[in-house]
Image: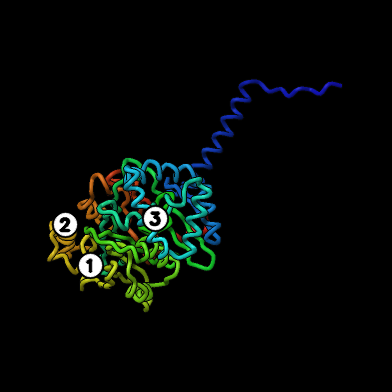
Amino acid sequence: MPIPKPNLNLKTIIIFIIIVIGFYFLWFYVYDDGNGPGLYHGIPVTTVKGDSYDMGVSLGNNLRPYIKSIIKDYLYKIFPDPKDRDKAYEKAKALEKYIPSDYRIEMDAISQNAKVTYEDILLLNTFIDFTKDELLSCSFSIGKGMSNEGYVYVGHNTEIKHHDILQEYTRLVVYKPSGKKKFVSITFPGFIGVLSGMNEDGLCLNIQKIKNDNYNLKNVPSSILTRMILERQVDVPFVSNYVSDKYVAASINLAIAGKSDNDQYELIVAELSGNKAKILHPDKEGRLITTNIYNSEVDASPFNDNDYLKIFNRINPFTSPINIEKMQKILDSVAKDDMTIQTIIFVPELKKFYLACDKIPSTKGNMNLIDLDYIFKNY
């Protein structure tokens, strides 16, 4: 007896296909609080966990095309001349011995699985220490007495020469390393160091590169030190003690906020270089501004037409509480039209931060609220 054929006409098939596609897009764009898989408020997210090798394998496999593109279309634009690139490789190699072995293992695993050279991954994670003006950035922080919600705020602009590509690749990398603290790095594919980030305790930090030619190839790369802090440290007093005798390859300001030893929240700036480690605290109003000049040298600096004074004049005298919108406007006043590709406002007490990265300058973009507790649970 012949098996009856299902009575499916073209209209039924088309309706079925439309329903399937509709459910797929509904899940992709709406599921999980308005986010699709691998996205959080439209921002790409990559989660890695395990030991250094496992995390490197995951990063290399999952981000392979982006890493290849960043090396070819970004890193090689910084060093277009092969002879200059060879010199940069030599400097990166000199810094390698000051990078802890677990990070070297991670970089090696990335290179093998992304099908790029280890030398390029090493250079990608060290070049900011010995190049001038590729990374600048500025930041300012206010104490809870100045904010409208009674929280510490840390505002930051990532200013980096993007070479017409890096601005397309901002990504949240969620690290869940074995035996260490979880943290989120606001970063780019192939970078394992941290330029800006926050850990599971709400400890947050960001780097501002000092405008000078000074670097020391016998110290830890600056973004590697910041990752070490996020993975290991609980609160600001711990960080203050940890960096008080740490020297780094580059001259940097490191803005840090998090818990104090009495469960309040506090701010510090660490002025670091190859021969300097100095901790600064906010003024009596709770303000702490960090730009591309050491705060202790602002008055004597030849650059004091700078962002420091622009920010200071906008928050001095303190007349009314500052909210997130005003923080963004202040950051916009010092944005570099051709370099500001990430704008971040950390709220460490809530373990949250706002991130804009959809425009250049990013200060004019949409500020998306990133909730670390949600990310650690769902990604």
Q: Residues within 10 Å of mark 1 (few under 14, many from 20)?
A: many
Q: CA distance from mark 2 to mark 1?
A: 17 Å
Q: Dot 3, crowdedness within 10 Å: few (<14), some or many (≥20)?
A: many
Which numbered dot is residue 306? Answer: 2
The residues tagged by marks 2 and 3 sit, at their Cα atoms, a distance apart of 28 Å
Instruction: List the residue tagged with mark 1.
Output: 287
Name, please, the residue furthest toward the front. Answer: 83
Q: Is residue 71 left or right of residue 130?
A: right
Q: Position of residue 253 (x, y in %)?
A: 27, 64
Q: CA distance from mark 3 to mark 1?
A: 31 Å
Q: Quadrant of the N terminus?
A: top right
Q: Residue furthest right?
A: 1
Horizontal side of residue 29 vs 7, given as left or right = left
Mark in the foreground, 2 or 1: 2
Q: Position of residue 304 (x, y in %)?
A: 13, 59
- Quarter holding residue 244: bottom left
Which residue type carries mark 2?
A: Asn
- Circle 3 sits on which residue? 125
Q: Is residue 120 visible?
A: yes
Q: Residue 286 in the image: state x and y as whole percent.
A: 24, 70
